[in-house]
Image: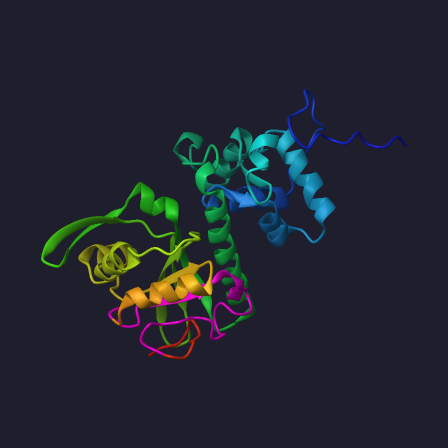
Amino acid sequence: MANKKRLPRYGRVPKPPAIRLTERDRHILEAIHSFDGMLGFSQIRRLFFTGKSQAEERLKLLYQNGYLNRPNRGQRMRMPEMVYWLDRAGAEIVASLTGTPVNKLGWRREPRWFQVEHDLAVNNFRLDLIEACHDDAEISLEVWVPESEFWANPDTIVYTNKGKEIWRQIRPDGYFMLATPKLYLRYLVEIDRSTEDNPRFFREKILPGMAYLNSEEYGDRFGHRSGRWLIVTTTERRLRNMLSQAERKTKGLFYFTTYDKLSSKTILHAPIWKREDRKELVPLLFIG
């Protein structure tokens, strides 16, 4: 039997091979939509495949048949890995699975090109969290609110700094709630990809972040006033700079770590998180 003709990596062929959607294909489409509209190749493989070539060929077939879209050669050169988002046929499948008209689905037509690396980092954080909860029978991930929800419907808060009234819209990179045997824990996520020290971190992140946790807007949105901010940044130097700006005023409401310390094995129980009010590192589930 003749070998199948290899599909091109970039660009669609006029007559792609026919495809019969599998249950896994539908789950892939749903996952891409639920992860704020974009997943990287490594992330899709992490969720659904064991082999690299198997994942590549299946995703290529979904792309050629208009269920998925992906960057052209020039776009791909500017990002760390191949990424995928829904094309029209894929959006129609997701809409049909949820009983939503496709024009009401709110699917992402293309990535936010200026922050692909940031969005991939958010996805990796979420995947680490999902796997960690899957491996711990006593912890469950009850809620994940993606960044797009906060951009579509941001909360506006008012607070004062040095006698000046400040209005700020709050748009975290995500919000999630964990259920433990004793209580629910709520977290807001800030993924920091900057490589240079930011002397304005206290003014731009800590002050509005603390005000948000104490605001009626936060309580009305999530039904509770408790919560913590998780800051994931690039280097120990940048983390120390952020901590120095906290000025021991965050009352343990901000937890800091770096990307290299995060994994599904460490995110919940390992002492990888730093608080400005404690000398030692603490686990995410630390209460105190």
Identify the residue at horizontal 36%, vertical 64% (top origin).
Answer: 241
Which one is in front, 286 or 207? 207
Quadrant (top left, top right, bottom left, bottom right) of the C terminus: bottom left
Percent of width and height locating residue 264: 54, 65
Q: Is residue 72 visible?
A: no
Residue range highlighted in magenta: 249-278
Q: Nearer the viewer, residue 268 or 94?
A: 268
User: Residue 9 appears in which quarter of the rendering?
Assistant: top right
- Secondary structure mostly taken by the magenta-highlighted segment of the chain: loop
Does residue 96 appear in this view?
yes
How many numbered tags mark residues here? 0
Residue shown at the point (46%, 52%) measured from the top left:
122
Where is residue 4 shown, x and y percent of the image?
81, 32
What coloring was used for the rendering? rainbow
Choose between 99 and 157: the one closer to the eye.
157
**x, y percentage for residue 34?**
47, 46
Task: State the image coordinates of residue 130 (x, y, percent, origin top left).
Answer: 51, 60
Residue 274 lies, with reference to residue 25, above or below; the image says below
Q: Please report the residue visible at 47 percent of the width from the left and 32 percent of the height from the top.
A: 109
Location of residue 235 with respect to 78 vertically, above or below: below
Q: Quadrant of the N terminus?
A: top right
In the image shown, does 258 or 16 lie closer to the viewer?
Answer: 258
- Residue furthest right as drawn: 1
The residue lying furthest to the top in this view is 14
Residue 275 lies within the magenta run: yes
Magenta run includes residue 148: no
Q: Is residue 199 left or right of residue 86?
A: left
